[in-house]
Image: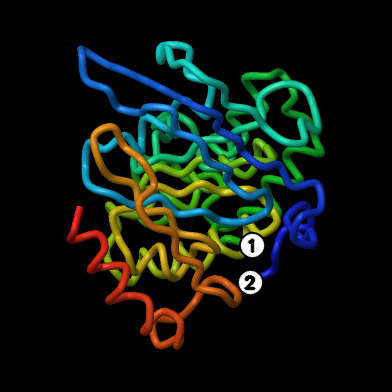
Amino acid sequence: MIVPAHARKPDGLDAVSIVLDNVSLSFAGTVIFENLSLQVEGGKCTCLLGPSGCGKSTLLKMISGNTSIHYQGSISFSPRSRRGNMTAWMSQNDLLLPWMDVENNVLLGAKLRFKRDSHQRQQAAKFLTEAGLGEHATSLPAVLSGGMRQRVALLRTLMEDRPILLMDEPFSALDALTRIKLQNMAAQMTRGKTVLLVTHDPMEALRLGDKILVMAGNPAKVTAIFEPGGTTPRNADDGSVGKQYPLLLSKLLEQ
C-alpha cells in the first residue's frame, strides 16, 4: 500500500504530544479520575486498554474538547503547532451519511468548512484509490460491506489532516480477517501522526501500539505500560507479540 504523502514523516517531526496534568473528573458522585497525569507521545500510536466503564472513552472525549465534560486540571498539546482543532475522531460506528456517496462522505469535513475545492477532491480520490475504493467513489454507503464502510470512515478522518487521531474501538465490529486488513491499512496511513486508540483487544494493541497503557481502578489510573518495540503493524507471530501477549492478558485479567 502507498502511504499518503502527508503521513510520510519521520517519527517526532511536527508531532504533537497530549499532556494531561492532574486531571480530575467526577460524575453523579462517582470519582472517575483523580489527579491523573500522563503524556501521550507525539508521532506514535498509544493504545489504551482496561475494563468497561473505567473511563477510556470519556478520556478521549475530554481530549477532543467535548464541552459537556467538566473536569479539573489541564489537558494541553505540546507543541501547539497551529490554531484550531487539533484532533480528529473515529469511532466504532462509521456514521456515514446514507444520502451521500462515498467521495462526498470522505469530503464531509471540507464541505462543512466550505473548503471543498479541486485540491480536496484530488486528495480524496487519491485516498480512495490507495484504500482500494476508487471504483466505489459514487456508491452509496448502503451497498458497501462493513469493512468498506469503515475504510471510508478512516479516510474521512484522515482528510481532516489533524495532528492527533482519537480512535474509539474503530475495528471492533468487524469480522476477524477484515479487522486485520483495516488495522494494517490504518497503521500505514496514520504513520507520523499522534494516535490514541481505545481497544478491548490485547492482540490489536500489540499489533498497532508503540506503547500500551492499561487503565483500571476507581478512580482510574494507569496500572501498567507495555512497549512492544519494532515497527507496526506487527504480525501475530512476531516475537515481541508472542512474548508480551500472555503478560498483557494476565494484567488485564487482574483488573
Q: Secondary structure at mark 2?
A: loop
> Seen in the image, is 247 located left or right of residue 86?
left
Q: Which residue lies at the image location 41% right of the left edge and 15% below the top edge?
A: 69
Q: Which residue is mark 1?
A: 130
Q: Are marks 2 and 1 in contact (CB under 8 Å)?
A: yes
Q: Which residue is mark 2?
A: 1
> Seen in the image, is 246 located left or right of residue 90?
left
For marks 2 and 1, give the one nearer the viewer. 2
Quarter of the picture holding the N terminus: bottom right
Type of amino acid at the residue the image marks with label 2 = Met
Q: Sequence order check: which comes first, mark 2 or mark 1?
A: 2
Give the quadrant of residue 204: bottom left
Total labels: the figure holds 2
Type of amino acid at the residue the image marks with label 1 = Glu
Q: Which residue lies at the image location 63% right of the left edge and 58% below the top edge?
A: 189
Mark 1 Cα shell of 10 Å, populated few (<14), some (14-19), many (≥20): some
Give the quadrant of residue 201: bottom left
The x and y percentages for residue 154 are: 52, 48
Residue in front for this viewpoint, 175 or 248: 248
Mark 2 Cα shell of 10 Å, populated few (<14), some (14-19), many (≥20): few
Q: CA distance from mark 2 to mark 1?
A: 7 Å
The x and y percentages for residue 157 are: 57, 40
Colouring method of the image: rainbow
